[in-house]
């Protein structure tokens, strides 16, 4: 059985994500933390007749209690975008939030699997890594940036064009989680596209977040589709990490030797999950010439995003 903590659980993503986690029969405790409103959210969810006990914690003083004994920590904390903003515009405020939460993890549950949703993911994951390193508890196999929303969107958008079953359409999306760093591998789907279709699809997948930000018109960014993607990832961690399920593969933004060989510390790619977190770094899908160009552009942007996150904690300028 697993204790899952959701940090900033009363937000737009946090609430539907907590609801989905409450439906998982393998969860023994669902620990909800936020700066406001968690007692209400916890009381509400606790009436659902599934096994997990729901606890609600508020304010900095209760962060330690929220985290004690957690096996999985999911972080949908921080401010979302408004129209006209990039994810990087969220850096200053969200960097501080992620650092505080990672410090809490280092002190209370250093062995937990940590899944970071807070934007800009390309930089917040390096921030969490450097914070955990500073406390001597960093394990690269246990820290994940959640990029699955890009995979979910890619499957939806491809199936709309090709008439395939969206639940059975698989598109690996590698790189990172913002604009040009999002690299969908359409050549690996076995489906054929004209170059015009490919370019339109890649653009829509890369800027899917903007589509939602624009439609929400100043009230936030994707929350429900993110909660779905976030739960898919948590469920994969539970199945592979705690229920002994083999062959569980998802794309995630992780620290790997492979990434370092390409000049970056983190890169989103398919990984096989297991009891220690990442069980296996899978070979990248084959890229065609068009995708190789996208890949190069992604690496260039990622370098800057990662350096910005790392230097926020280390103070070192790259
Ligand atoms: N990885 C991904 O694919 C995606 C990431 N996101 C990111 O997830 C994050 C959360 O998004 P939403 O749930 O829509 O936001 P929200 O504003 O609805 O909720 C965020 C939570 O953080 C807390 N919070 C906000 N400002 C704070 C501050 N100054 N100090 C401490 N806590 C604060 C709030 O109490 C709230 O519970 C954003 O950074 C957003 O960009 C959103 C969609 C997809
Ligand atoms: O676009 C945003 O700011 C939220 C996000 O990361 C996404 O929806 O992919």
Image: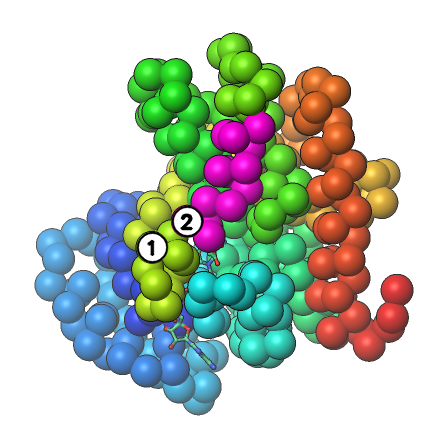
Secondary structure of the residue carrying tag 2 is helix
Q: Main secondary structure of the magenta part?
A: helix
Q: Dividing the image into 4 quarters, which one contains the C terminus?
A: bottom right
Query: How crowded is the residue under tag 2: few (<14 C-alpha within 10 Å), some, or many (20+)?
Result: some
Which residue is depicted at the point 74% across and 58% down?
A: 306
Q: Quadrant of residue 286?
A: top right
What's the distance in space between the residues labelled 1 and 2, CA to CA? 6 Å
Which residue bears the numbered disc 2?
Answer: 211
Secondary structure of the residue carrying tag 1 is helix
Which residue bears the numbered disc 1?
Answer: 215
- Residue 208 placed where, x, y %? 46, 45
Is residue 97 toward the left or the right of residue 153 in the image?
Answer: right
Q: Are marks 1 and 2 in contact (CB under 8 Å)?
A: yes
Which residue is depicted at the point 69% across and 51% down?
A: 140
Foreground pick, 198 / 253: 198
User: From which residue to which does the magenta span run?
Assistant: 199-211
Q: Is residue 271 visible?
A: no
Query: How crowded is the residue under tag 1: few (<14 C-alpha within 10 Å), some, or many (20+)?
Result: few
Foreground pick, 255 / 184: 184
């Amino acid at each position: 059985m697993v204790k899952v903590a959701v940090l900033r659980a009363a937000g737009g993503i946090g609430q539907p994500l907590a609801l989905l986690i409450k439906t998982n029969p393998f969860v023994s405790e669902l620990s909800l933390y936020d700066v406001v409103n968690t007692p209400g959210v916890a009381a509400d969810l606790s009436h659902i007749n599934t096994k997990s006990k729901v606890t609600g914690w508020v304010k900095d003083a209760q962060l330690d209690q929220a985290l004690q004994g957690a096996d999985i920590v999911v972080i949908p904390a921080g401010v979302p975008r408004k129209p006209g903003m990039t994810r990087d515009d969220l850096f200053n405020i969200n960097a501080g939030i992620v650092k505080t939460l990672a410090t809490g993890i280092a002190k209370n549950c250093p062995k937990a699997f940590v899944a970071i949703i807070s934007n800009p993911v390309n930089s917040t994951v390096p921030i969490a890594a450097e914070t955990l390193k500073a406390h001597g508890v960093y394990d690269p196999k246990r820290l994940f940036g959640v990029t699955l929303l890009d995979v979910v969107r890619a499957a939806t958008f491809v199936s709309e064009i090709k008439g395939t079953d969206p639940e059975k359409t698989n598109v690996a999306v590698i790189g990172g989680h913002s604009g040009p760093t999002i690299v969908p591998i359409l050549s690996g789907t076995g489906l054929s596209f004209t170059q015009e279709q490919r370019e339109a699809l890649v653009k829509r997948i890369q800027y899917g977040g903007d589509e939602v930000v624009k439609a929400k018109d100043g009230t936030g960014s994707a929350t429900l589709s993110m909660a779905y993607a976030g739960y898919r990832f948590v469920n994969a961690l539970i199945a592979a990490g705690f229920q002994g399920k083999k062959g569980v593969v998802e794309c995630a933004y992780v620290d790997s030797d492979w990434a370092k060989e390409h000049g970056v510390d983190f890169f989103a790619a398919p990984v096989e999950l297991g009891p220690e977190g990442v069980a296996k770094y899978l070979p990248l899908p084959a890229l065609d010439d068009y995708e190789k160009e996208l890949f190069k552009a992604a690496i260039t942007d990622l370098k800057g995003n990662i350096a910005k996150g790392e230097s926020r904690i280390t103070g070192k300028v790259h």
